[in-house]
Image: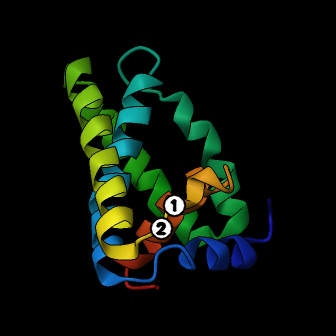
Amino acid sequence: MFDYARLMSDYASYHLTPGNQRAHSIGIPLIVFAVVKWTQIGSFFPLAALALPVYFLWNWRVGWMMTGFIAASAAAGAFLPMGVAHAAFVVGWIFQIYGHKVHEKNRPALLDNLTHALIGPAFVAEKLAGLR
């Protein structure tokens, strides 16, 4: 669970095609936004932020990127109705399934390893930041 390089390598092996990577660059942020909104206590603090120490243990850059994304999601979520989070989750998964079915021709990595639920956002964060 704490060997970031191994986990990232395993995750990357399921996401080799540019089309699937683009689909995930849209789908994963939508899903993370939904989880942040669903776990918000009051109007701001999301319980999803409790995963941040894991990101910092894995990679401090990814930890800061995820902190920023979770904070931005929580700020937006404070003003958006719950239905937006539901729609974001569904649309996010449509992108995920599309990427795997059409571009990668395999099944989502999450089905083989639940830690991919945390590695996926880190993979996308690194990709969007030009680190991958």
- The front one of 49 and 2 is 2
Q: In which quarter of the image is residue 119?
A: bottom right
Q: In which quarter of the image is residue 116?
A: bottom right
Numbered disc 1: secondary structure = helix
Q: Which residue is drawn at 69% across and 54% down?
A: 54
Q: Which residue is drawn at 20% across and 28% down?
A: 84
Residue 59 position in % (x across, y down): 64, 71
Q: Which residue is drawn at 40% across and 74% down?
A: 104
- The front one of 113 and 6 is 113
Residue 120, numbered label = 1
Q: Is disc 2 surrounded by few (<14), some (14 to 19) or many (20+) residues within 10 Å? A: few
Amino acid type assigned to the residue bearing label 1 in the image:
Gly
* Up-down relation of residue 65 to residue 93 (above or below): below
**What quarter of the picture does the N terminus occupy?**
bottom right
Q: How many discs appear? A: 2
* Residue 64 falls left or right of residue 6: left
Spatial distance from mark 2 to mark 1, Cα to Cα? Answer: 16 Å
Residue 64, numbered label = none
Q: Quadrant of residue 129?
A: bottom left
Marks 2,1: beta carbons within 8 A? no
List the residue tagged with mark 2. Answer: 106
* Residue 77 falls left or right of residue 127: left
